[in-house]
């Protein structure tokens, strides 16, 4: 597990998984996940690597969380053979967004304005003070839709029993819920509930 400013290096995870996949003596791989998600860059590739390892003879990949496996982190978890979680942990948030913050008014109050000279329809998109055009909005929404379609497709391939609600609502689901049918297992996003990491390890 590697942390840097709250982020985990997908390169280091990829390297570790490749080593585990190549080691004949390693038959079980546990992904200990505690993440609200993150950027989509490298997530599809890392998810595909996890999926490919599950298809190797003699290798089983488990995903575990005792806190949260959401969004991009759930994308990765969904590619494991099994997902095990504690009762108070949550999984899900299957959805995609792109936020655009335009500080144009704040710039104007400070006496700053933007003059932009460009070539290319979307060049300068996201530059502070540059208003989005309708073409920009359609372009960005298209990117969000495309990435989300990839996300949902990946989850479907790894979690055949994932509910339509989970795939469409971007909701989070707890391991144990007092609301009937609201748990992660009921929505097909997890396979089992344990009390702790130690119990998880003892089971696998």
Image: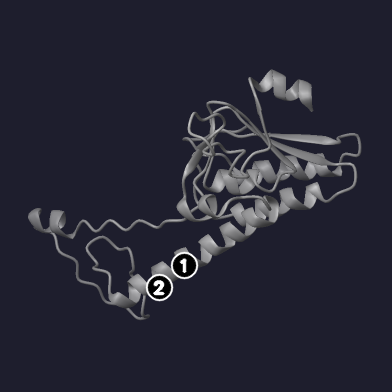
Q: Residue furthest front?
A: 180
Question: Callout 1: 10 Å neighbours few (<14), some, many (20+)?
Answer: some
The percent position of residue 172, horizontal first and vertical second, equals: 48, 41
Q: Is any part of residue 33 visible from this angle?
A: yes
Task: Look at 91% across and 34% down and name the residue there.
Answer: 25
The percent position of residue 164, horizontal first and vertical second, equals: 55, 55
The percent position of residue 150, horizontal first and vertical second, equals: 58, 62
Q: Label 1's element? A: helix
Q: Do the numbered discs 1 and 2 sit on residues whose CB atoms are within 8 Å?
A: yes
Q: Nearer the viewer, residue 158 or 45?
A: 158
In the image, taking residue 116 as reference, residue 126 lies left or right, namely: right
Question: Callout 2: 10 Å neighbours few (<14), some, many (20+)?
Answer: few
Q: Which residue is mark 1?
A: 143
Mark 1 to mark 2: distance in Å? 6 Å
Q: Label 2's element? A: helix
Q: Nearer the viewer, residue 111 or 15?
A: 15
User: Disc count in the image?
Assistant: 2
The C terminus is located in which quarter?
top right
In the image, taking residue 191 as reference, residue 132 lies left or right, namely: left
The percent position of residue 186, horizontal first and vertical second, equals: 60, 40
Task: Look at 26% across and 60% down and name the residue there.
Answer: 128
Quarter of image, res 97 = bottom left
Vertical placement of residue 5 versus 92, above or below = above
Q: Nearer the viewer, residue 20 or 28?
A: 28
Q: Which residue is mark 2?
A: 139
Quarter of image, res 101 = bottom left
Task: Look at 77% across and 20% down and name the residue there.
Answer: 202
Q: Nearer the viewer, residue 85 or 73?
A: 85
In the image, taking residue 70 as reference, residue 63 lies left or right, namely: right
């Amino acid at each position: 597990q590697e942390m840097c400013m709250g982020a985990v290096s997908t390169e280091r995870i990829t390297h570790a998984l490749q080593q585990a996949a190549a080691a004949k003596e390693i038959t079980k791989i546990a992904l200990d996940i505690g993440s609200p998600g993150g950027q989509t860059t490298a997530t599809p590739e890392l998810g595909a690597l996890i999926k490919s390892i599950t298809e190797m003879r003699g290798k089983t990949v488990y995903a575990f969380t005792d806190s949260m496996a959401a969004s991009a982190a759930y994308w990765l978890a969904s590619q494991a053979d099994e997902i095990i979680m504690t009762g108070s942990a949550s999984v899900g948030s299957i959805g995609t967004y792109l936020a655009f913050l335009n500080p144009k008014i704040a710039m104007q109050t400070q006496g700053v304005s933007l003059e932009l000279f460009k070539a290319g329809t979307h060049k300068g998109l996201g530059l502070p003070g540059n208003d989005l055009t309708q073409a920009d909005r359609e372009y960005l929404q298209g990117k969000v839709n495309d990435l989300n379609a990839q996300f949902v497709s990946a989850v479907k391939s790894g979690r055949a029993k994932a509910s339509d609600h989970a795939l469409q609502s971007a909701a989070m689901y707890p391991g144990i819920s007092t609301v009937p049918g609201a748990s992660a297992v009921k929505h097909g996003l997890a396979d089992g509930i344990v009390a702790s990491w130690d119990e998880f390890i003892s089971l696998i």
